[in-house]
Image (cartoon, rainbow, N blue to C red):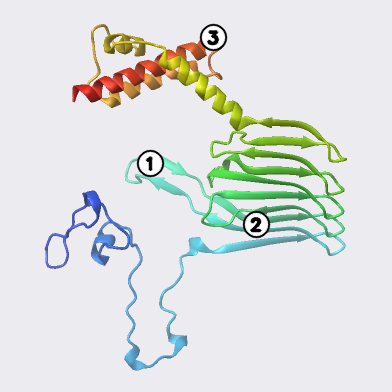
Amino acid sequence: MLQGYNEKKEQLAVPGANGLLDLHRSSLEELQLARIYTRHRTDVMLSQGYNSEEDDSDADETDGRLYTERQYHDNGNPKYFRTYMRLPATVSQPSLKPPSYCERSCERVIEEKHFDVGGVCRLDVHFALGQPYLSRKHFYENQRLKSEKLFFVEDERTMRSRKAGHWREYFEGGQIKSEIQYDEHGMRCGFCKRYSEDGAQQWVKDYTKEYGDRIAEFNAKRGKLSLNAEEAAAMLGFREHYLPKDRREVDSMYRKRCAPLHPDKSPDPDAHERFLEVSRAREVLLKWLETER
């Protein structure tokens, strides 16, 4: 819980559930003490008049400035437009020597367009401020859409991203070439299709149904495993005759046991079956902890 004192040395109470700060319910003093508000409040005396030219007393921060870069072909047609924001370097725990963690400065793109010599936009990128999705579109020379794709950007500085939403590709005549869907995990989902130029379907697959079938099979196999608490603890890797005290112990051992079983890390053909056993063991221990309470 955050605690502080005002000018009268009276203890400030922190509102909100569980003693947490709330942006809209907390007082100005509380938000200033917590370094949520870092700007100074501007008080204005309107008794001297209402001249708008004298209101410029609340300057903007420099790190919010937008920059635009433009390049042109020799014939005068646009070649490259880009709007971006400069993100300053940040340091966590700067009091440590050396600092514990440092992020380098970077240029965060907001909009970017590339044009051919004829002035046709061939690439259009949008990454609006305040939202995590980046849209990217390619175009043919005849200005028809070639592809439209969406990315969920996990880190604005490194631009580490994953595929998201609907991805579509088109033939030069405008006919749909492919449509692929991605869920919140960056995995294919729903019906994904590919077409020939005459519109005939060449490939189609329902990934959601396939995932549902695998979950049903997984849960059916897991339900057939019968374990008591000690057997489950041993399967997770606890020492003999030891039973965990809380959920954190169970989850910690479960993660350690699951890591080597990941398909990208384990060549073992039985890794899937072992993962079933480990998952069932975790479930048994969690139920046992609930009954012990």
Q: Which callout, 2 or 3, points to the residue nearer the camera?
A: 3
Label 2 close to label 3 by CB (< 8 Å): no
Which of the labelled discs sits on residue 86, or is there none? Answer: none
Q: Considering only vertical position in the picture, is 185 above or below 228? A: below
In the rendered structure, which amino acid carries the disc numbered 3?
A: Asp
Please report whichever mark, 1 or 3, sits nearer to the chain's N-terminal start: 1
Residue density around tag 3, few if under 14, some if 14–19, many if 20 or more, within 10 Å = few
**Residue 257 visible, this angle:** no
Q: Position of residue 176 (x, y in %)?
A: 79, 44
Residue density around tag 1, few if under 14, some if 14–19, many if 20 or more, within 10 Å = few
Q: Position of residue 65 (x, y in %)?
A: 54, 64
Residue sitting at 56 percent across and 44 percent down?
A: 153
In the rendered structure, which amino acid carries the disc numbered 1?
A: Pro
Residue extending farthest top: 240
Which of the labelled discs sits on residue 268, or is there none? Answer: 3
Gap between marks 1 and 2 measured at Cα: 33 Å
Please report whichever mark, 1 or 2, sits nearer to the chain's N-terminal start: 1
The residue closer to the viewer here, 206 or 276, is: 206
In the rendered structure, which amino acid carries the disc numbered 2?
A: Glu
The residue closer to the viewer here, 195 or 133, is: 195
Q: Considering only vertical position in the picture, is 253 above or below 27? A: above
Please report whichever mark, 2 or 3, sits nearer to the chain's N-terminal start: 2
Residue sitting at 47 percent across and 18 percent down?
A: 220
Residue bearing mark 1: 99
**Where is residue 166, by image quadrant?**
top right
Label 1 close to label 2 by CB (< 8 Å): no
Residue sitting at 25 percent across and 65 percent down?
A: 27
Disc 2 element:
strand
Q: Position of residue 138 (x, y in %)?
A: 76, 49
The residue closer to the viewer here, 153 or 272, is: 272
Residue bearing mark 2: 111
Q: Image check: 258 left or right of 172? A: left
